[in-house]
Amino acid sequence: TQLLEQSPQFLSIQEGENLTVYCNSSSVFSSLQWYRQEPGEGPVLLVTVVTGGEVKKLKRLTFQFGDARKDSSLHITAAQPGDTGLYLCAGDFASGTYKYIFGTGTRLKVLA
Amino acid sequence: GAVVSQHPSWVICKSGTSVKIECRSLDFQATTMFWYRQFPKQSLMLMATSNEGSKATYEQGVEKDKFLINHASLTLSTLTVTSAHPEDSSFYICSARKKTSTDTQYFGPGTRLTVL
């Protein structure tokens, strides 16, 4: 069974600080997605990365896919209280199935 | 847009009863739908993959006779939790994949099930 470990599990920071969340696996991903989930709601897709070494930016969020496609990171610059939520990576391990397995999650709280 | 709805949004039932949860793609056709469950403070766990017109594929450890999945049309999949027990209490979330977009799944808002 493929396992996606995210670190840290919990993160509480002050508004304006920067942070990085990591997603790691021992297996190669065909593609990887990052989501954010608010309490009591479904996850919302932030980005999909496919190519090793790929970097994508979404406003203050920067996503990087590892060269070997086994890991990814999410960096948030100048965090705001609105960034608070559960961040989830999800990997597709078997090319062609597009069945995504979710990571363990990182719960972020940004204090005003 | 790509909107997925779930019904009901929450349900409370007695132990031993069965509960049906619907997942609908409102403005697109979904050849594949996925069912997840999420316990408090935890991540999503994939339960099964549902393809229109065929039997669902269950993940290891998920009882297919307990969690009945039907995907009768390109816009509707249902999950029935049979003989529910308190340990089945969870947040159940579905997602749907468009026929034309294989790597993107659109999530529903989830259904909170509480079994007394």
Image (cartoon, coloured by chain):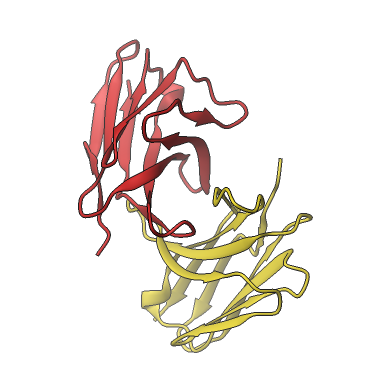
Chain colours: A yellow, B red
Is B2 above or below relative to A112? above
Residue B89 versus residue B94 in the image, above or below: above
Name the foreground residue: B55 vs A83.
B55
Quarter of the image where one finds residue A81: bottom left
**Can you tell which quarter of the image residue A71 is in?**
bottom right
Residue drawn at x 27%, y 60% is B2
- Tell me the quarter of the image containing the C terminus of chain A: bottom left
Of B66 and B53, nearer the camera is: B53
Image: B11 above or below B39: above
Percent position of residue B5, x then y: 24, 47
Quadrant location, the N terminus of chain A: top right
User: Residue sitting at 38 percent across and 44 percent down?
Assistant: B31
Task: Answer left or right for B41 relative to B113.
Answer: right
Q: Is residue A71 left or right of residue B10?
A: right
Q: Nearer the viewer, residue A43 or B40?
A: A43
- Which residue sits at x=25%, y=27%? B12
